[in-house]
């Protein structure tokens, strides 16, 4: 018996017991807190952060939830998430585009008001903001997709003709009209939400989504051949032979062959 | 004397000094708490923008930034280096409370203080058992846990649950379910644990206690010779472990309450019928000589339990 005749100090025992109790309690409390913290990072898709907000994970390490951005927002767009009411991390600023969209003030007062840099002060042109990306989510109900001329999302876009353009397409239903398809260009879209706010449908057909939902991503190694070719000013691989394309139409064997394809329209450049 | 210990807490002081003087610092403190709330509310309620923001971070008159230093500390540990405005604001608050005394925040500013004070008042009136009493050092462990979780998750962790900023923000920006949280703290302090929240758990109080450990504003038991052992100060003090070293110290020991746990609320001053305590600074360790020789107190009569 190594300890025989040498009683251990009761203070030491007490200290070890207390330390074990306290650390045990802290592990339990800390785990709960960490679980809450993990939960807080899940930002609902319809909640948009103010302009130049850091990516969500960094934002939650930077935003002290003071509400100064909310105070300086002249259009009452921003609000602070309320405990148990909004699914956004409590006390942090956000806006819902369908309720009040961002008016994209030139002087970006919300960013100027942020004391901590949770809203990155390096943003000096509101057109460079990336609060989200508009997506025309419902092509079946969008009036323009039905062949009508609603165009409201296009007209209200603060970056009109860059962030949203109208692309013409043939109207298959009527057979003789054009459709004007609202088309979002993510590079120019700030995610302000004016389009979503203004959509005339009871439930908006165009919605601003966070980029993580709205966008795919190209693989790093992908190259667009036609861009590379243009940049090089010539074919990428020398000595390739280019066979003539077999076009449908008179003079090709396409029509002669049984079951050959005859287009319903006239090809450009082919005699009427 | 045993009759005195059986009087309701504070009754003797009211008889001696009158109700007003027996509640002087309590009233001052409530006024201070209301004022701090009012300057934040003047803007949203009446459009008079003296202070914008909340206790977490604010801007006074468009020039003076103030930031909660504990939130900033968590932010830095979580991996974000704040902009200069927030750092300056945090330094101002830090220096101010380090000079005055950190836990002045707890008793004169914090909006949760009236809630826990009310719970403790009800606790006394209902003669509740003191309940679960973890060690006073528990809050330091909580503080350490909060900092560790902030670092591990990259989220300002205490702001997920901090009832102080939540209550303050809810009053200024809109409520949510913060009222439920406030009631929970009231019930916790009333039924589960006497002085449970502010005295044992709140890491904000622990943090301010640490930074204000050498604060100038102190309560002194300068007139401790006059103490008649009525125990009223122990009954009202939210951190009553701080009293004995000053009040019952051996001759020659300092009469100053130097423990950083003391919230300098001044309630002991109010409630003392013989004016043992007074506010002073930490270098004033003068002990008042008894103005007339007090007879030795009667031996303590056995109290029925």
Image (cartoon, coloured by chain):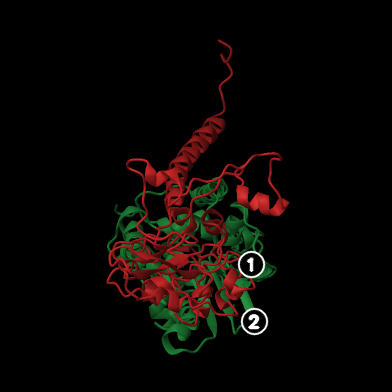
Chain colours: A red, B green
Badges 2 and 1, same chain: yes
Task: Evaluate whether residue A114 shows in this view.
Answer: no
Q: Secondary structure at mark 1?
A: helix
Q: Is residue B50 left or right of residue A122?
A: left
**Residue A108 location, quadrant:** bottom right
Nearest the viewer among A38 and B244 is A38
Q: Relative to B246, does residue B93 appear above or below in the rendering? A: below
Q: Is residue B98 above or below residue B249?
A: below
Counting residues from the start of the chain, the first of labels 2 and 1 encountered is 2
Image quadrant occupied by the N terminus of chain B: bottom left
- Residue A144 versus residue A175: which sits nearer the camera? A175
Q: Is residue A25 in sight in this rendering?
A: yes
Q: Which mark is residue B90?
A: 1
- Residue B62 relative to residue A45: left or right: right
The residues tagged by marks 2 and 1 sit, at their Cα atoms, a distance apart of 14 Å
Callout 1 environment at 10 Å: few (<14), some (14 to 19), or many (20+)?
many
Please report the residue visible at 38 percent of the width from the left and 44 percent of the height from the top.
A256
Res A182 quadrant in image: bottom left
Q: Measured from the top left, where is residue B212 in percent x and y?
A: 62, 63
Q: B85 or B32, which lies in front?
A: B85
Q: In this rendering, would A272 be left or right of B278?
A: left
Residue farthest along the top direction in this orientation: A1
Q: Chain of mark 2?
A: B
Look at discs 2 and 1 and give the one toward the viewer.
2
SS at mark 2 in the image: loop
Horizontal and vertical percent for residue B49? 52, 86
Q: x, y percentage for residue B29?
A: 48, 77
Query: Exactly how many numbered labels are in the figure?
Result: 2
Residue to which mark 2 is pinned: B63
Image mark for residue A254: none
What residue lies at 50% left-to-right and 75% top-to-bottom? A160
Disc 2 crowd rating (10 Å Cα; few below 14, some 14-19, many 20+) is few
């Amino acid at each position: 018996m190594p300890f025989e005749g040498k009683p251990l100090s009761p203070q030491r025992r007490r200290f070890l017991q207390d330390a074990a109790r306290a650390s045990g309690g802290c592990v339990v409390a800390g785990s709960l807190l960490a679980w809450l913290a993990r939960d807080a990072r899940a930002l609902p898709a319809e909640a948009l952060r103010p302009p130049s907000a850091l990516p969500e994970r960094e934002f939650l390490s930077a935003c002290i939830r003071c509400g100064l951005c909310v105070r300086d927002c002249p259009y009452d767009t921003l609000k602070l998430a309320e405990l148990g009411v909004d699914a956004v991390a409590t006390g942090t600023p956000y806006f819902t585009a369908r309720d009040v969209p961002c008016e994209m003030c030139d002087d970006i007062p919300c960013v100027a008001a942020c004391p901590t840099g949770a809203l990155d002060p390096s943003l000096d042109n509101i057109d460079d903001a990336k609060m989200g990306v508009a997506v025309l989510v419902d092509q079946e109900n969008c009036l323009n997709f039905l062949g009508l001329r609603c165009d409201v999302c296009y007209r209200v876009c603060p970056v009109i003709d860059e962030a949203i353009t109208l692309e013409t397409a043939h109207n298959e239903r009527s057979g003789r009209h054009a459709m004007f398809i609202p088309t979002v260009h993510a590079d120019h879209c700030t995610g302000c939400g004016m389009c979503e706010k203004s959509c005339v449908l009871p439930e908006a057909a165009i919605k601003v989504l966070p980029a993580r939902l709205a966008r795919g991503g190209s693989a790093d190694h992908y190259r667009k051949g036609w861009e590379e070719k243009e940049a090089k000013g010539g074919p990428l691989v020398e000595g390739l032979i280019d066979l003539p394309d077999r076009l449908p139409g008179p003079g090709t064997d396409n029509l002669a062959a049984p079951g050959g394809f005859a287009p319903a329209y006239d090809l450009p450049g082919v005699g009427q | 004397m045993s009759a005195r210990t059986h009087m309701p807490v504070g009754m003797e002081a009211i008889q001696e000094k009158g109700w007003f003087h027996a509640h002087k610092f309590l009233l001052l403190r409530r006024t201070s708490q209301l004022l701090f709330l009012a300057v934040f509310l003047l803007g949203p309620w009446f459009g008079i923008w003296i202070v914008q923001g909340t206790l977490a971070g604010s801007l006074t008159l468009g020039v003076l930034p103030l930031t909660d230093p504990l939130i900033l500390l968590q932010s830095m540990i979580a991996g974000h280096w704040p902009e200069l405005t927030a750092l300056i604001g945090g330094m101002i608050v830090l220096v101010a409370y380090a000079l005055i005394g950190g836990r002045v925040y707890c008793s004169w500013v914090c909006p949760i203080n009236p809630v826990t004070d009310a719970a403790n008042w009800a606790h006394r009136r209902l003669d509740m058992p003191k309940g679960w009493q973890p060690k006073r050092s528990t809050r330091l462990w909580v503080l350490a846990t909060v900092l560790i979780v902030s670092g591990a998750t990259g989220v300002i962790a205490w702001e997920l649950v901090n009832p102080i900023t939540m209550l303050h923000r809810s009053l200024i920006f809109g409520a949510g379910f913060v009222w439920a949280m406030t009631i929970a703290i009231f019930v916790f302090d009333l039924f589960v644990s006497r002085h449970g929240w502010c005295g044992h758990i709140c890491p904000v109080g622990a943090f301010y206690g640490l930074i204000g450990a050498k604060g100038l504003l102190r309560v002194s038991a300068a007139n401790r010779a006059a103490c008649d052992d009525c125990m009223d100060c122990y009954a009202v003090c939210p951190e009553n472990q701080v009293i004995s070293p000053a009040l019952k110290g051996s001759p020659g020991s300092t009469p100053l309450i130097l423990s950083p746990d003391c919230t300098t609320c001044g309630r002991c001053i109010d409630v003392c019928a013989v004016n043992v305590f007074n506010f002073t600074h930490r270098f004033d360790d003068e002990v008042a000589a008894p103005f007339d020789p007090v007879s030795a107190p009667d031996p303590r009569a056995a109290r029925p339990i």
